[in-house]
Image: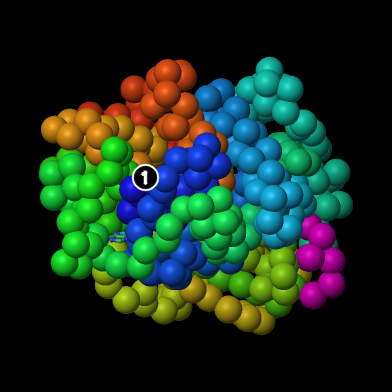
Amino acid sequence: MIVGAGTFGASLAWWLAGRGDEVVLVDQFEPGDARATSGGETRLIRCSHGPDADYTAMARRARTLWRELEAETGASLLTECGVSWFAHGDDGWEAASEATLRTLGIPVVHQDVREAAAQFPSFNGDDLAWVLHEPEAGVLRAQLGVQTLASAAAARGARIVRGVARPDGDRVVVGDEVLAADRVVWSCGGWLAKLFGGLVELRVTRQELFFFAGGPGWDRSPGWVDYDRAVYGTGDLDALGVKVAWDMEGPALDPDADLPPATDETERLTRGYAADRFPALAQARLVGSKTCRYEISPDSQFIAAPHPEHPSVWIVGGGSGHGFKHGPAMAERIVSSWHGGEPLPRRFGLHKRERGTSLRSAGSN
Ligand SMILES: Cc1cc2nc3c(=O)[nH]c(=O)nc-3n(C[C@H](O)[C@H](O)[C@H](O)COP(=O)(O)OP(=O)(O)OC[C@H]3O[C@@H](n4cnc5c(N)ncnc54)[C@H](O)[C@@H]3O)c2cc1C
Protein backbone atom coordinates (compact mmCIF):
# COMPACT_ATOMS: atom_id res chain seq x y z
CA MET A 1 0.00 0.00 0.00
CA ILE A 2 1.35 3.39 -1.01
CA VAL A 3 -0.03 6.65 0.37
CA GLY A 4 0.85 9.63 -1.81
CA ALA A 5 0.73 9.62 -5.61
CA GLY A 6 3.45 12.16 -6.38
CA THR A 7 6.50 11.25 -8.41
CA PHE A 8 7.84 8.95 -5.67
CA GLY A 9 4.59 7.13 -4.81
CA ALA A 10 3.22 6.86 -8.34
CA SER A 11 6.61 5.57 -9.55
CA LEU A 12 6.61 2.94 -6.80
CA ALA A 13 3.08 1.88 -7.76
CA TRP A 14 4.10 1.59 -11.41
CA TRP A 15 7.26 -0.36 -10.59
CA LEU A 16 5.67 -2.73 -8.06
CA ALA A 17 2.64 -3.41 -10.25
CA GLY A 18 5.08 -4.22 -13.07
CA ARG A 19 6.56 -6.96 -10.89
CA GLY A 20 3.09 -8.43 -10.43
CA ASP A 21 2.68 -7.21 -6.84
CA GLU A 22 -0.78 -6.35 -5.57
CA VAL A 23 -0.71 -2.56 -5.16
CA VAL A 24 -3.07 0.01 -3.67
CA LEU A 25 -2.19 3.67 -4.26
CA VAL A 26 -4.01 6.16 -2.04
CA ASP A 27 -4.10 9.94 -2.47
CA GLN A 28 -6.26 12.72 -1.13
CA PHE A 29 -6.18 14.38 -4.59
CA GLU A 30 -6.11 13.25 -8.21
CA PRO A 31 -2.52 12.48 -9.31
CA GLY A 32 -0.86 15.65 -10.62
CA ASP A 33 -2.93 18.06 -8.51
CA ALA A 34 -1.34 21.53 -8.28
CA ARG A 35 -1.30 21.32 -4.46
CA ALA A 36 1.17 18.42 -4.59
CA THR A 37 4.83 19.21 -5.26
CA SER A 38 4.76 17.01 -8.35
CA GLY A 39 1.98 19.17 -9.86
CA GLY A 40 2.70 21.96 -12.32
CA GLU A 41 3.68 21.65 -15.93
CA THR A 42 7.45 21.21 -16.16
CA ARG A 43 10.56 20.02 -14.33
CA LEU A 44 14.19 19.91 -15.45
CA ILE A 45 15.80 16.52 -15.86
CA ARG A 46 19.59 16.72 -15.67
CA CYS A 47 22.36 14.41 -14.58
CA SER A 48 24.81 16.99 -13.16
CA HIS A 49 25.07 16.72 -9.38
CA GLY A 50 28.54 18.15 -8.81
CA PRO A 51 30.92 15.43 -7.53
CA ASP A 52 28.03 13.14 -6.50
CA ALA A 53 28.24 10.06 -8.74
CA ASP A 54 25.31 8.27 -7.09
CA TYR A 55 22.69 10.95 -7.85
CA THR A 56 24.28 11.46 -11.28
CA ALA A 57 23.90 7.79 -12.19
CA MET A 58 20.39 7.68 -10.71
CA ALA A 59 19.26 10.64 -12.85
CA ARG A 60 20.63 8.90 -15.94
CA ARG A 61 18.80 5.70 -15.04
CA ALA A 62 15.63 7.72 -14.43
CA ARG A 63 15.88 9.17 -17.93
CA THR A 64 15.86 5.61 -19.34
CA LEU A 65 12.85 4.70 -17.21
CA TRP A 66 10.88 7.83 -18.23
CA ARG A 67 11.56 6.80 -21.83
CA GLU A 68 10.28 3.29 -21.03
CA LEU A 69 7.12 4.79 -19.54
CA GLU A 70 6.65 6.82 -22.73
CA ALA A 71 7.07 3.67 -24.85
CA GLU A 72 4.58 1.78 -22.69
CA THR A 73 1.90 4.47 -22.71
CA GLY A 74 2.45 6.59 -25.83
CA ALA A 75 2.67 9.73 -23.65
CA SER A 76 5.18 12.42 -24.60
CA LEU A 77 6.90 13.25 -21.32
CA LEU A 78 10.51 14.23 -21.97
CA THR A 79 11.62 17.02 -24.30
CA GLU A 80 15.32 16.52 -24.92
CA CYS A 81 16.22 20.19 -25.37
CA GLY A 82 19.42 19.91 -23.30
CA VAL A 83 20.28 21.73 -20.09
CA SER A 84 22.98 24.43 -19.87
CA TRP A 85 24.79 25.23 -16.60
CA PHE A 86 26.19 28.76 -16.40
CA ALA A 87 29.66 28.46 -14.80
CA HIS A 88 31.06 31.50 -13.00
CA GLY A 89 34.45 29.90 -12.37
CA ASP A 90 36.68 27.02 -13.41
CA ASP A 91 36.49 24.98 -10.23
CA GLY A 92 32.88 25.11 -9.07
CA TRP A 93 29.83 22.85 -9.26
CA GLU A 94 29.96 22.74 -13.06
CA ALA A 95 33.59 21.56 -13.21
CA ALA A 96 32.88 18.87 -10.62
CA SER A 97 29.77 17.85 -12.57
CA GLU A 98 31.69 17.65 -15.82
CA ALA A 99 34.30 15.34 -14.27
CA THR A 100 31.58 13.07 -12.87
CA LEU A 101 29.61 12.98 -16.12
CA ARG A 102 32.74 12.09 -18.10
CA THR A 103 33.67 9.33 -15.65
CA LEU A 104 30.18 7.83 -16.03
CA GLY A 105 30.14 8.21 -19.84
CA ILE A 106 27.20 10.62 -19.86
CA PRO A 107 27.23 13.04 -22.83
CA VAL A 108 28.48 16.51 -21.90
CA VAL A 109 29.84 19.49 -23.83
CA HIS A 110 32.26 22.06 -22.39
CA GLN A 111 31.22 25.26 -24.22
CA ASP A 112 32.79 28.66 -24.37
CA VAL A 113 30.37 31.47 -23.70
CA ARG A 114 30.02 32.40 -27.39
CA GLU A 115 29.02 28.84 -28.32
CA ALA A 116 26.53 28.74 -25.46
CA ALA A 117 25.04 32.10 -26.44
CA ALA A 118 24.19 30.74 -29.87
CA GLN A 119 21.69 28.33 -28.29
CA PHE A 120 19.52 31.15 -26.91
CA PRO A 121 17.64 33.84 -28.88
CA SER A 122 19.23 36.42 -26.58
CA PHE A 123 22.11 35.92 -24.15
CA ASN A 124 24.58 37.89 -22.07
CA GLY A 125 27.40 35.80 -20.63
CA ASP A 126 29.79 38.57 -19.62
CA ASP A 127 29.90 37.28 -16.03
CA LEU A 128 30.46 33.64 -17.06
CA ALA A 129 33.66 31.62 -17.42
CA TRP A 130 32.13 28.84 -19.52
CA VAL A 131 28.97 26.74 -19.88
CA LEU A 132 28.42 23.05 -19.18
CA HIS A 133 25.88 21.66 -21.62
CA GLU A 134 24.12 18.33 -21.14
CA PRO A 135 22.69 17.58 -24.60
CA GLU A 136 20.57 14.60 -23.48
CA ALA A 137 19.02 16.43 -20.54
CA GLY A 138 15.84 18.44 -20.89
CA VAL A 139 12.38 19.06 -19.52
CA LEU A 140 9.80 16.61 -18.17
CA ARG A 141 6.06 17.27 -18.34
CA ALA A 142 5.55 16.88 -14.60
CA GLN A 143 1.81 16.77 -14.06
CA LEU A 144 1.35 14.60 -17.14
CA GLY A 145 4.23 12.42 -15.95
CA VAL A 146 2.58 11.69 -12.61
CA GLN A 147 -0.80 11.10 -14.21
CA THR A 148 0.84 8.73 -16.69
CA LEU A 149 2.67 6.83 -13.93
CA ALA A 150 -0.61 6.38 -12.03
CA SER A 151 -2.61 5.31 -15.06
CA ALA A 152 0.16 2.95 -16.20
CA ALA A 153 0.23 1.49 -12.67
CA ALA A 154 -3.55 0.99 -12.90
CA ALA A 155 -3.16 -0.65 -16.31
CA ARG A 156 -0.65 -3.02 -14.67
CA GLY A 157 -3.25 -3.90 -12.03
CA ALA A 158 -2.78 -1.32 -9.23
CA ARG A 159 -5.90 -0.05 -7.48
CA ILE A 160 -6.10 3.73 -7.10
CA VAL A 161 -8.06 4.98 -4.09
CA ARG A 162 -9.03 8.60 -3.38
CA GLY A 163 -9.01 9.51 0.31
CA VAL A 164 -7.17 11.14 3.19
CA ALA A 165 -5.09 8.55 5.05
CA ARG A 166 -3.46 8.53 8.47
CA PRO A 167 -1.04 6.08 10.02
CA ASP A 168 -2.10 3.76 12.83
CA GLY A 169 0.99 1.74 13.77
CA ASP A 170 1.75 -0.37 10.72
CA ARG A 171 -1.76 0.09 9.31
CA VAL A 172 -3.43 2.79 7.24
CA VAL A 173 -6.71 4.44 8.17
CA VAL A 174 -8.70 5.85 5.24
CA GLY A 175 -12.04 7.27 6.34
CA ASP A 176 -13.74 4.54 8.41
CA GLU A 177 -11.56 1.78 7.04
CA VAL A 178 -8.43 0.37 8.68
CA LEU A 179 -6.26 -1.21 6.00
CA ALA A 180 -3.34 -3.59 6.39
CA ALA A 181 -0.66 -4.53 3.89
CA ASP A 182 2.61 -6.50 3.85
CA ARG A 183 4.34 -3.21 3.31
CA VAL A 184 3.13 0.38 3.60
CA VAL A 185 4.90 3.34 2.01
CA TRP A 186 4.14 6.90 3.06
CA SER A 187 5.30 9.09 0.17
CA CYS A 188 3.38 12.18 1.20
CA GLY A 189 5.68 14.99 0.09
CA GLY A 190 5.36 18.08 2.30
CA TRP A 191 2.78 16.37 4.50
CA LEU A 192 5.31 13.83 5.85
CA ALA A 193 6.49 16.10 8.66
CA LYS A 194 2.88 16.55 9.82
CA LEU A 195 2.13 12.84 9.62
CA PHE A 196 5.37 11.76 11.30
CA GLY A 197 6.24 14.68 13.57
CA GLY A 198 9.53 14.18 15.40
CA LEU A 199 10.67 11.56 12.89
CA VAL A 200 10.77 13.44 9.60
CA GLU A 201 12.46 16.83 9.41
CA LEU A 202 11.31 18.84 6.39
CA ARG A 203 10.80 22.54 5.77
CA VAL A 204 7.90 23.31 3.45
CA THR A 205 8.47 26.57 1.58
CA ARG A 206 6.66 28.79 -0.92
CA GLN A 207 8.38 29.01 -4.33
CA GLU A 208 7.45 31.28 -7.22
CA LEU A 209 7.63 30.80 -11.00
CA PHE A 210 7.32 33.37 -13.79
CA PHE A 211 6.60 32.89 -17.49
CA PHE A 212 7.46 35.57 -20.07
CA ALA A 213 6.41 36.08 -23.69
CA GLY A 214 9.82 35.66 -25.30
CA GLY A 215 8.88 35.53 -28.96
CA PRO A 216 10.37 33.33 -31.69
CA GLY A 217 13.22 30.91 -31.01
CA TRP A 218 12.57 30.26 -27.35
CA ASP A 219 10.73 27.01 -28.10
CA ARG A 220 14.07 25.46 -29.13
CA SER A 221 16.36 26.79 -26.40
CA PRO A 222 17.79 24.55 -23.65
CA GLY A 223 16.71 24.46 -20.05
CA TRP A 224 19.30 26.21 -17.90
CA VAL A 225 20.59 26.56 -14.35
CA ASP A 226 22.67 29.38 -12.87
CA TYR A 227 23.78 27.40 -9.82
CA ASP A 228 25.79 30.15 -8.12
CA ARG A 229 23.04 32.72 -8.55
CA ALA A 230 20.31 30.20 -7.63
CA VAL A 231 18.10 30.75 -10.68
CA TYR A 232 16.86 28.29 -13.30
CA GLY A 233 14.46 28.18 -16.18
CA THR A 234 13.29 26.67 -19.44
CA GLY A 235 12.56 27.82 -22.95
CA ASP A 236 9.00 28.27 -24.11
CA LEU A 237 7.79 24.69 -23.83
CA ASP A 238 4.17 23.98 -24.85
CA ALA A 239 3.57 27.73 -25.35
CA LEU A 240 3.67 28.31 -21.57
CA GLY A 241 6.16 31.17 -21.98
CA VAL A 242 9.86 31.36 -21.07
CA LYS A 243 10.14 30.15 -17.47
CA VAL A 244 12.44 31.92 -14.99
CA ALA A 245 12.43 30.95 -11.30
CA TRP A 246 14.49 31.69 -8.21
CA ASP A 247 15.71 28.59 -6.44
CA MET A 248 16.28 30.24 -3.06
CA GLU A 249 14.18 28.91 -0.22
CA GLY A 250 11.04 30.96 0.11
CA PRO A 251 9.08 31.55 3.33
CA ALA A 252 7.39 28.69 5.17
CA LEU A 253 4.01 27.60 3.76
CA ASP A 254 1.85 24.95 5.40
CA PRO A 255 1.13 22.06 2.99
CA ASP A 256 -2.62 22.45 3.66
CA ALA A 257 -2.68 26.22 3.11
CA ASP A 258 -4.00 27.65 -0.17
CA LEU A 259 -1.26 28.50 -2.66
CA PRO A 260 -1.01 32.30 -2.63
CA PRO A 261 -0.37 34.32 -5.81
CA ALA A 262 3.21 35.16 -6.78
CA THR A 263 4.50 38.42 -5.34
CA ASP A 264 5.49 41.67 -7.08
CA GLU A 265 8.81 41.61 -5.21
CA THR A 266 9.86 38.22 -6.61
CA GLU A 267 8.64 39.25 -10.07
CA ARG A 268 10.89 42.31 -9.82
CA LEU A 269 13.90 40.17 -8.83
CA THR A 270 13.15 37.61 -11.54
CA ARG A 271 12.81 40.30 -14.20
CA GLY A 272 16.13 41.70 -13.02
CA TYR A 273 17.86 38.37 -13.59
CA ALA A 274 16.11 37.84 -16.94
CA ALA A 275 17.17 41.29 -18.13
CA ASP A 276 20.81 40.58 -17.13
CA ARG A 277 21.06 37.17 -18.69
CA PHE A 278 18.63 37.34 -21.62
CA PRO A 279 18.48 41.05 -22.57
CA ALA A 280 15.58 40.57 -25.00
CA LEU A 281 13.39 39.51 -22.07
CA ALA A 282 13.93 42.81 -20.21
CA GLN A 283 10.60 44.24 -21.35
CA ALA A 284 8.86 40.94 -22.12
CA ARG A 285 5.22 40.64 -21.14
CA LEU A 286 4.49 38.40 -18.16
CA VAL A 287 2.18 35.66 -19.43
CA GLY A 288 1.86 33.71 -16.20
CA SER A 289 3.05 33.22 -12.67
CA LYS A 290 2.38 30.65 -9.99
CA THR A 291 3.48 29.42 -6.62
CA CYS A 292 4.24 25.93 -5.45
CA ARG A 293 5.92 24.24 -2.50
CA TYR A 294 9.32 22.72 -1.89
CA GLU A 295 9.68 20.15 0.90
CA ILE A 296 13.30 20.43 1.88
CA SER A 297 15.35 18.06 4.00
CA PRO A 298 18.19 19.70 6.00
CA ASP A 299 20.90 18.38 3.66
CA SER A 300 18.76 18.19 0.46
CA GLN A 301 19.24 14.39 0.43
CA PHE A 302 16.17 12.24 -0.20
CA ILE A 303 14.45 10.12 2.46
CA ALA A 304 13.81 6.41 1.89
CA ALA A 305 13.87 4.42 5.09
CA PRO A 306 11.82 2.10 7.30
CA HIS A 307 9.95 3.48 10.29
CA PRO A 308 12.09 2.73 13.37
CA GLU A 309 9.15 1.12 15.26
CA HIS A 310 7.35 -0.52 12.32
CA PRO A 311 9.83 -2.14 9.90
CA SER A 312 7.13 -2.84 7.29
CA VAL A 313 6.30 0.87 7.12
CA TRP A 314 8.49 3.02 4.85
CA ILE A 315 8.86 6.75 4.54
CA VAL A 316 9.90 8.14 1.16
CA GLY A 317 10.31 11.77 0.14
CA GLY A 318 12.48 14.78 0.88
CA GLY A 319 12.64 15.73 -2.81
CA SER A 320 14.16 19.06 -1.76
CA GLY A 321 13.44 20.85 -5.01
CA HIS A 322 15.25 18.28 -7.16
CA GLY A 323 13.36 15.02 -6.66
CA PHE A 324 10.95 14.89 -9.56
CA LYS A 325 13.18 13.43 -12.24
CA HIS A 326 14.46 10.69 -9.92
CA GLY A 327 11.02 9.16 -9.17
CA PRO A 328 11.16 5.99 -11.31
CA ALA A 329 14.83 5.29 -10.50
CA MET A 330 14.24 5.75 -6.77
CA ALA A 331 11.33 3.30 -7.03
CA GLU A 332 13.53 0.75 -8.74
CA ARG A 333 16.25 1.11 -6.08
CA ILE A 334 13.86 0.96 -3.15
CA VAL A 335 12.12 -2.17 -4.42
CA SER A 336 15.43 -3.81 -5.26
CA SER A 337 16.67 -3.14 -1.70
CA TRP A 338 13.59 -4.95 -0.35
CA HIS A 339 14.40 -8.05 -2.38
CA GLY A 340 18.08 -8.61 -1.64
CA GLY A 341 19.48 -5.99 -4.00
CA GLU A 342 21.87 -3.23 -3.05
CA PRO A 343 20.94 -1.62 0.28
CA LEU A 344 19.94 2.03 0.09
CA PRO A 345 22.62 4.52 1.13
CA ARG A 346 22.64 5.53 4.77
CA ARG A 347 22.17 9.15 3.78
CA PHE A 348 18.52 8.40 2.83
CA GLY A 349 17.93 7.45 6.48
CA LEU A 350 15.83 9.07 9.20
CA HIS A 351 18.83 10.06 11.32
CA LYS A 352 19.41 13.64 12.47
CA ARG A 353 20.82 15.53 9.50
CA GLU A 354 23.13 18.52 9.32
CA ARG A 355 22.42 21.40 6.95
CA GLY A 356 24.62 20.85 3.91
CA THR A 357 25.42 22.05 0.43
CA SER A 358 22.40 21.96 -1.80
CA LEU A 359 22.03 19.35 -4.52
CA ARG A 360 19.48 21.69 -6.12
CA SER A 361 21.43 24.91 -6.53
CA ALA A 362 23.09 27.36 -4.18
CA GLY A 363 19.52 28.29 -3.27
CA SER A 364 19.65 26.96 0.28
CA ASN A 365 21.92 29.87 1.10
C1 LIG B 1 8.63 24.98 -8.31
C2 LIG B 1 9.29 23.64 -8.26
C3 LIG B 1 10.29 23.35 -9.17
C4 LIG B 1 10.93 22.14 -9.12
N1 LIG B 1 11.87 21.85 -10.06
C5 LIG B 1 12.36 20.60 -10.15
C6 LIG B 1 13.15 20.25 -11.26
O1 LIG B 1 13.41 21.08 -12.14
N2 LIG B 1 13.61 18.98 -11.33
C7 LIG B 1 13.32 18.05 -10.39
O2 LIG B 1 13.75 16.91 -10.53
N3 LIG B 1 12.55 18.35 -9.31
C8 LIG B 1 12.06 19.60 -9.18
N4 LIG B 1 11.25 19.95 -8.14
C9 LIG B 1 11.09 19.01 -7.01
C10 LIG B 1 10.08 17.93 -7.26
O3 LIG B 1 8.96 18.43 -7.94
C11 LIG B 1 9.70 17.30 -5.91
O4 LIG B 1 10.88 16.88 -5.24
C12 LIG B 1 8.83 16.08 -6.11
O5 LIG B 1 7.77 16.35 -7.00
C13 LIG B 1 8.27 15.61 -4.76
O6 LIG B 1 7.42 14.52 -4.99
P1 LIG B 1 6.72 13.71 -3.82
O7 LIG B 1 6.16 12.49 -4.45
O8 LIG B 1 7.66 13.55 -2.67
O9 LIG B 1 5.59 14.70 -3.26
P2 LIG B 1 4.18 15.19 -3.83
O10 LIG B 1 4.23 15.37 -5.29
O11 LIG B 1 3.76 16.35 -3.02
O12 LIG B 1 3.22 13.98 -3.57
C14 LIG B 1 2.74 13.67 -2.29
C15 LIG B 1 1.31 13.20 -2.39
O13 LIG B 1 0.89 12.72 -1.12
C16 LIG B 1 -0.47 13.03 -0.99
N5 LIG B 1 -0.81 13.02 0.43
C17 LIG B 1 -0.19 13.71 1.41
N6 LIG B 1 -0.73 13.42 2.60
C18 LIG B 1 -1.72 12.54 2.37
C19 LIG B 1 -2.65 11.86 3.19
N7 LIG B 1 -2.67 12.03 4.51
N8 LIG B 1 -3.56 11.03 2.62
C20 LIG B 1 -3.55 10.84 1.26
N9 LIG B 1 -2.69 11.46 0.44
C21 LIG B 1 -1.78 12.28 0.98
C22 LIG B 1 -0.60 14.41 -1.61
O14 LIG B 1 -1.93 14.69 -1.97
C23 LIG B 1 0.34 14.31 -2.79
O15 LIG B 1 -0.33 13.96 -3.98
C24 LIG B 1 10.59 21.18 -8.13
C25 LIG B 1 9.58 21.47 -7.21
C26 LIG B 1 8.93 22.68 -7.28
C27 LIG B 1 7.85 22.97 -6.30
Q: Please state which of residues 291 and 180 is positioned toward the viewer in this rendering.
A: 180
Residue 131 placed where, x, y %? Answer: 73, 39
Residue 361 placed where, x, y %? Answer: 50, 43
Which residue lies at the image location 35% right of the left edge and 67% below the top edge?
162
Q: Please state which of residues 3 and 318 is positioned toward the viewer in this rendering.
A: 3
Badge 1 amino acid: Gly
Name the quarter where the C terminus is drawn: top left
Residue 140 placed where, x, y %? Answer: 64, 55
Q: Which residues are magenta?
A: 215-224
- Does mark 1's beta carbon lie closer than 8 Å to ligand 1? yes
Q: Is residue 271 left or right of residue 365?
A: right
Quarter of the render that holds ligand 1: bottom left
Residue 88 placed where, x, y %? Answer: 63, 39
Q: Is residue 55 left or right of residue 116?
A: left
**Residue annotated with mark 1:** 317
* Location of residue 317 by image quarter: top left
Which residue lies at the image location 70% right of the left edge and 60% below the top edge?
75
Which residue lies at the image location 80% right of the left edge and 46% below the top edge?
116
